[in-house]
Amino acid sequence: MKEVLRFQFAKTGRAKYISQLDLIRCVQRAIRRSELPVHYTNGFHPHMEAVFAAALPLGMESIGEILEVRFAEPIEPEAARARLQSALPVGLELLRVYEPVHKMGELAYVRYRIVLPSEQPELLLEQWKQFLEQPEILVEKKSKRGVRTVDLLPQVDCQSAEAMEQAVKWEWCLSVGQPESVNPMLILTAFTQFAGISLEFPEICRLQLCTKEKTEFF
């Protein structure tokens, strides 16, 4: 039994429209309802020691989210999972609970699955190849420091691309956190502009959080 546990959870269905701030509040309420012995910080305004590994962009599903919780006393992982799951709303499912292996600072990449509907998937796949053959892919990126121009090309690690029936499916491994985070919608927007098509109803799912070696983050 350990005082710190990590919960891998899925955020799917209607839950993908819960913002990160609302997700934090939702999980905190669920922890309180579960009556788990979570640890609180000291001081005038104690707060629950429950941390999410990386914010998921609004409108995206995930099967690889991570929540780390510090408990005030040891608790069995399966008991913690069962009690917390019973208090969570539909769309948030705890997949496994385990003792932390990597430090939070070791999180560096995220794997995504992207499905883009298309009436001509073979053509779209060929346009994707041409898109990546450009010497650079310059886009304007907004951040807290303002708007700046960045080259997306070095940041696109496309691990697979295939034409399906009425769609193209990709798997990308993109950086997260410092020094650079890449939102898959930024890539999709640049690509659809290049291909001269409208960006409608993409399905984006976060599959896994990874270390700088692009191995699974535990």
Image (tube, rainbow, N blue to C red):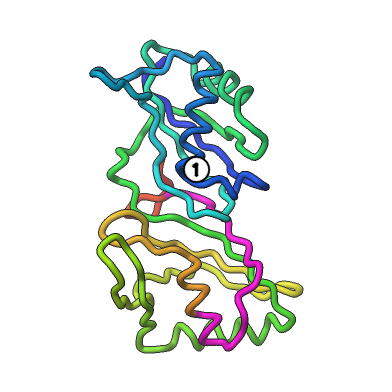
**In the image shown, does 90 or 122 lie closer to the viewer?**
90
Counting from the top left corner in percent of width and height, residue 179 is at: 26, 59
Could you say which is closer to the camera, residue 32 or residue 152?
A: 32
What residue is at 75 percent from the left and 75 percent from the top?
Answer: 166
Q: Residues within 10 Å of mark 1 (few under 14, many from 20)?
A: many
Q: From what the image shows, is residue 58 above or below residue 44?
A: below
Q: Position of residue 61 (x, y in %)?
A: 59, 51
Farthest residue toward the top?
73
Quarter that holds the N terminus: top left
Q: Which residues are magenta?
A: 191-209
Location of residue 44 (image quadrant): top left
- Whether the magenta-drawn stretch holds residue 94 is answered as no
Q: Residue at x 50, y 22 (%)?
A: 31
Q: Residue furthest front?
A: 44
Task: From the image, tell me which residue sits under label 1.
Answer: 65
Q: Residue at x 41, y 38 (%)?
A: 52
Residue 89 falls in which quadrant of the image? Answer: top right
